[in-house]
Amino acid sequence: MVTWNSYRFWQILCGVICCAFVITGVTMEHATSGLSSLLPPEILGWKPAGKDSVYNRSTLYEYIDGGAEFYLSYGFKEVINRRYTSAGKPDIMVDLFDMATAPNAFGVFSQSMETVDESFGQGSQISTGLIIFWKDRYYVSMMAHPETDESKKALQTLAAKIDAAITRKGLLPGIMNILPEKGLVKESIRYFRHHAWLNAYYFIDDRNLLRINDSTEALLAKYTGGEKRSLLLLVEYPDERSAQQAHGDFAKSCLPNTSDKVPVRLEDGTWTACRLSSNLLMAVFNASQPERASLLLEAVEKKQRLRKGENDGTIKPNAKGVPKR
């Protein structure tokens, strides 16, 4: 049976960053990387302490023991670590991750997104002594502990300098274009390509019933309406056959003897519905009424039809970007 799970990635990522803060420079020889050109040589009196450390897919476990799988599941390529110091002031640690593609960088960032903030990059989160943001194919985290007025200003300056150094902006995952806007809780969006991240927010099964892997794109988002927030899951497969196989496995194990057109009431009183549209699997969990689940899926199907029409040329956007026939 599927159940809601309130697991929070923000706490995990903060723990990973703190762990990295402690062990930096201990487990790997100093190295050089093209990423260093994106880091400033000085920030308000803080200067690099020694040489940078660089980790790739083979050595990331040495740097982030227990947290490497998270980044590897998003196509991680390389990370550069630099520690800035200033006499009598807290050290500043920055990690700049090259995630290979903009969707991967957004995916990593999305797992810790709690508010919609664009102070830095294409999306950022700011907490006490901590700033994270993403831009193009890069994910950036930096921290200073303990936070002081001076270190807070230095962190913000560092974030602004790295933001400016990354001159390009990346495209969001294409699957986000079919998210219905009405009722969408934007800060709840989670993009991923590994089934473990689905179970972290809504546990379905220990098995990868939906066959989420590197060849798929998956997205979770919460929607307001009714007594509870509904959870929308979208999984886009490389072809229709893969989507049908995943839908069959999921329906057989979790929603037996049901129809795609009829939402199912679970033991906790919430409603679940699942449909297939070409190579797209869509499901709604935690809906307070069956009508909420059906309407949300219908809205996705409408957006999907518009997107397919634009792609095959049967629907063309006008000068303002609004699709028209």
Image: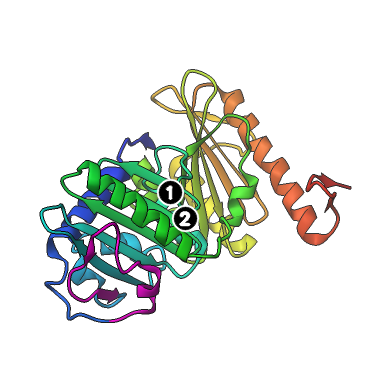
**Image quadrant where residue 139 sits:** bottom left
Up/down of 291 relative to 304, above or below: above
* Residue 52 among magenta residues: yes
Up/down of 161 relative to 125, above or below: below
Residue 54 appears anywhere in the view: yes
Q: Which residue is mark 1?
A: 110
Helix, strand or loop under label 1: helix
Name the one closer to the observer, 32 or 309: 32
Going by the numbered disc 1, the residue's amino acid type is Ser
The residue located at (42%, 67%) in the rendering is 99
* Residue 286, x across and y down, in percent: 46, 30
- Say the numbered circle drawn on residue 235: none
Q: Which residues are magenta?
A: 32-55
* Residue 281, x across and y down, in percent: 58, 49
Name the one closer to the observer, 110 or 235: 110
- Image quarter of the N terminus: top left
Helix, strand or loop under label 2: helix
The residue located at (21%, 51%) in the rendering is 144
* Residue 49, x across and y down, in percent: 18, 69
Residues under numbered marks 2 and 1 in contact, where contact means CB atoms less than 8 Å apart: yes
The residue located at (54%, 41%) in the rendering is 283
Name the one closer to the observer, 308 or 90: 90
Q: Give the farthest residue toward the front.
A: 45
- State the separation of the CA atoms marked 2 and 1: 6 Å
Q: Which residue is mark 2?
A: 106
- Answer with left or right where residue 99 lies relative to residue 148: right
Going by the numbered disc 2, the residue's amino acid type is Phe
- Answer with left or right where residue 55 lies relative to residue 303: left
* Residue 277 among magenta residues: no
